[in-house]
Amino acid sequence: MKKDIEIPLVKDVHLAAVHEWNEEFLEKNWNTYIINNRDTPIETVIAVSTGYKGDQKTSTMRHGLGDIPAKSSKRIEVLQEEILAFTNEFFVTYFADNKLYEKRFVFEKNSIKEDNFITLPVMELDGVMAR
């Protein structure tokens, strides 16, 4: 029954946006990363992203990220400057400890900016952490 379903709490897995130099386009881009700050790997990671602002909505993007080792990170996607004014959501699911985990990460509209930088775990870069 419903009371028998255990929904594990996501701990030490984060999502962040980092402003990085892109050698190909010779400009800075915002890249999103999944950060595994756990002592064990996370497996079969899937991230689904979408953005919205009023009646406007971005395409839904699905990313199969595979396994992410302990204390490491993996790039998900580039965020175009135009969608930084949108609320951007990422639904992340993964397996760990023989359980399925899921969490919704959100960047509120206009929150992805250098004024909101913190030092990110594992990556030791400045970036914006999703809540």
Image (spheres, rainbow, N blue to C red):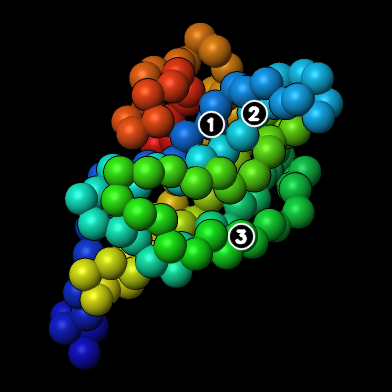
Q: Examine the image and state in which quarter residue 47 appears.
A: bottom right
Asked whether, in this view, residue 44 is left or right of residue 82, the answer is left
Mark 2 near mark 1, Cβ–Cβ under 8 Å?
Answer: yes
Q: Name the residue rendered at 56%, 44% in the picture.
A: 75
Asked whether, in this view, residue 28 is left or right of residue 7, the answer is right
Q: Examine the image and state in which quarter residue 121 appears.
A: top left
**In the image, what residue type sits under mark 1?**
Ala
Residue 73 position in % (x across, y down): 43, 43
Nearer to us in this view, 92 or 109: 92
Q: Name the residue rendered at 55%, 27% in the picture.
A: 18
Checking the image for residue 30, the label placed there is 2
| Label 2 neighbour load within 10 Å: few <14, some 14-19, many 20+ | many
**In the image, what residue type sits under mark 3?**
His
Residue 50 position in % (x across, y down): 65, 50
Q: Measured along the vertical axis of the image, is residue 38 above or below residue 128? A: below
CA distance for labels 2 and 1: 6 Å
Q: Measured along the vertical axis of the image, is residue 69 above or below residue 108? A: below
* Pointer 1 residue: 17
Q: Name the residue rendered at 61%, 60% in the picture.
A: 63
CA distance for labels 3 and 2: 17 Å
Q: Secondary structure at mark 1?
A: strand
Residue 87 position in % (x across, y down): 60, 37
Residue with the most extreme bottom position:
1
Nearer to us in this view, 123 or 101: 123
Residue 13, can we see it?
A: no
**In the image, what residue type sits under mark 2?**
Trp
Q: Secondary structure at mark 2?
A: strand
Q: Measured along the vertical axis of the image, is residue 18 above or below residue 45? A: above
Q: Name the residue rendered at 23%, 57% in the picture.
A: 40
Earlier residue among tags 3 and 2: 2
* Pointer 3 residue: 63
Checking the image for residue 25, the label placed there is none
